Image: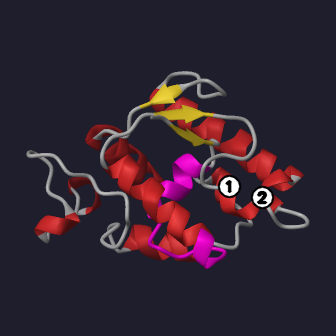
Amino acid sequence: MTIRLRTHHLLCMLTYVGKGYSPAFVDNYEAIAARLSAGEEIVIVDGPDDICAPLLCGAQPHCLGDGVAERDRKAAEAVATLLAMPVMAGTRLTPSASLLLRLRRTFAEGDIRAACSGCEWSGLCDTVAAEGYAKARIAIATADVPTRRQGVLHRCCQT
């Protein structure tokens, strides 16, 4: 299968620690985090994605708002610059250790966070990044990259 993500969720997934808008949202995100940790392919979509799904039942889901679309635009621009490739609807990415480490390093440095401006979760994300992603649910598990499960911070986060 493939995980459908809107572009700003490429940033959100880096710092997801099991908190969210509702229990249904968290349960859904936990399942997606496990799939991402297993290396399941990502396809970029415009608008609501697999993470948004539990929120779409509400009267006015914020997933459909103009501000969220602007976050997507800014995230797409930042990630495309970092990866030196277009990032738009239909782009496919594999959440490999090298990709996640690169995204986390630049996220922690603040270089790809324009989309995060004004986000209610920004403070939490700041803390997760500052703590070396130790509690992040998306695992980076390869034989040659230390992981939080081995009790070692990711190489990009060590100081």
Q: Quadrant of the N terminus?
A: top left
State which quadrant residue 149 falls in.
bottom left
Q: Residue placed at 28% from the left, 61% from the top? A: 157
Judge the density around disc 2: few (<14), some (14-19), many (≥20) Cα neighbours within 10 Å. Answer: some
Q: Which residues are magenta?
A: 9-24
Q: Is residue 11 magenta?
A: yes
> Residue 155 has which mark?
none
Q: Is residue 122 above or below residue 45?
A: below
Residue 79: image location, x then y, percent = 54, 37
Q: Residue at x 59, y 43 (%)?
A: 5
Position of the C terminus, as image quadrant, is bottom left
Q: Which residue is identified by label 2? A: 56
**Amino acid type of the residue tagged 1 in the rendering:** Ala
Residue type marked 2: Leu
Graded by Cα atoms within 10 Å as few (under 14), some (14 to 19) or many (20 or more), the crowding at tag 1 reads some
Where residue 23 sits, quadrant-wise, is: bottom right
Name the residue tied to disc 1. Answer: 53
**Residue 95 in the image, given as x and y percentages of width and height:** 37, 40
Compared with residue 69, is residue 34 higher up or lower down, i.e. above or below? below
Report if the CB atoms under discs 1 and 2 are less than 8 Å apart: yes
Secondary structure at badge 1 equals helix
Q: Residue at x 70, y 61 (%)?
A: 117
Q: Position of residue 13 (x, y in %)?
A: 49, 56
Which residue is at the front of the view, 53 or 6? 53
